[in-house]
Amino acid sequence: MSKTPLTLCLWYEGDAEEAANFYAATFADSHVGAVHRSPTDTPGGKEGDVLTVEFTLLGTPCLGLNGPPIFKHNEAFSFIVHTDTQDETDRLWDAITGNGGTESVCGWCKDKWGVSWQITPRVLLEATTSPDKAVAKRAFDAMMTMKKIDIAAIEAAVRG
């Protein structure tokens, strides 16, 4: 396990290894580390089942914990992934939603395990936090009409 003082722990219902492998294949600076098996039966599984999976997601150490179906992911926690291009935005959005995930609004989507993601182009953040309140409003109003963020439409809104 990493010597970093912070590791995110995500609860899965038996498919932490599948999720970690998907994340590692989808996101840069991501990989799967150790897979630990349960030394005994647990409320969520049997002896020998995968209990935890160490993985790195975009450089951040994480632990996938397999447990019984008592805790669900929700939008109160999400990963924000900053993108630089429409191609990168499309690729990540499509990977998440195309693998059993669901679309939401304003750049939000959920993966098939219920983890919420914000696929957020940097240009959107720059526009919506612009010191020019009219620019910020136009960009924000444009974003409110979108599911996946359209960078060209945000840039057009900025120009007015």
Image (cartoon, rainbow, N blue to C red):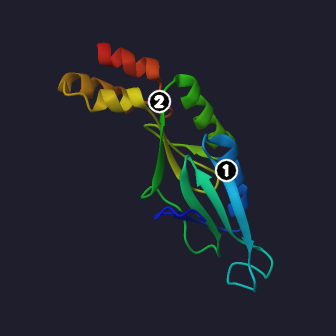
The quadrant in which residue 44 appears is bottom right
Where does the image place residue 160, in percent across and percent down from the top left?
Answer: 28, 13
Question: At 60% from the left edge and 36% from the top edge, which residue is drawn?
Answer: 92
Which element carries disc 2, helix, strand or loop? loop
106 with respect to 11 (left or right):
left
Mark carried by residue 149: 2
Q: Are marks 1 and 2 in contact (CB under 8 Å)?
A: no
Question: At 32% from the left edge and 29% from the top edge, which residue is drawn?
Answer: 126
Where does the image place residue 3, in percent across and percent down from the top left?
Answer: 53, 64
Q: Distance between the residues labelled 1 and 2?
A: 27 Å
Please identify the residue farthest to the front as the structure is shown: 3
The quadrant in which residue 129 appears is top left
Mark carried by residue 56: none
Q: Nearer the viewer, residue 15 or 145?
A: 15
Please identify the residue farthest to the right as the structure is shown: 48
Mark carried by residue 31: 1
Instruction: Answer yes or no: is residue 99 visible.
Output: no
Task: Tell me which numbered mark, 1 or 2, is placed earlier along the sequence.
Answer: 1
Q: Nearer the viewer, residue 138 or 128?
A: 128
The residue carrying pointer 1 sits among few (fewer than 14), some (14 to 19) or many (20 or more) residues within 10 Å by Cα, namely many
Where does the image place residue 63, in percent across and percent down from the top left?
Answer: 60, 64
Q: Nearer the viewer, mark 1 or mark 2?
A: 1
Q: What residue type is labelled 2?
A: Ile
151 with respect to 46 (left or right):
left
Where does the image place residue 6, in percent across and percent down from the top left?
Answer: 47, 63
The residue carrying pointer 2 sits among few (fewer than 14), some (14 to 19) or many (20 or more) residues within 10 Å by Cα, namely many
Instruction: Answer yes or no: is residue 86 visible.
Output: yes
Vertical relation: 56 (above or below) 151? below
Q: Which amino acid does label 1 sit on?
A: His
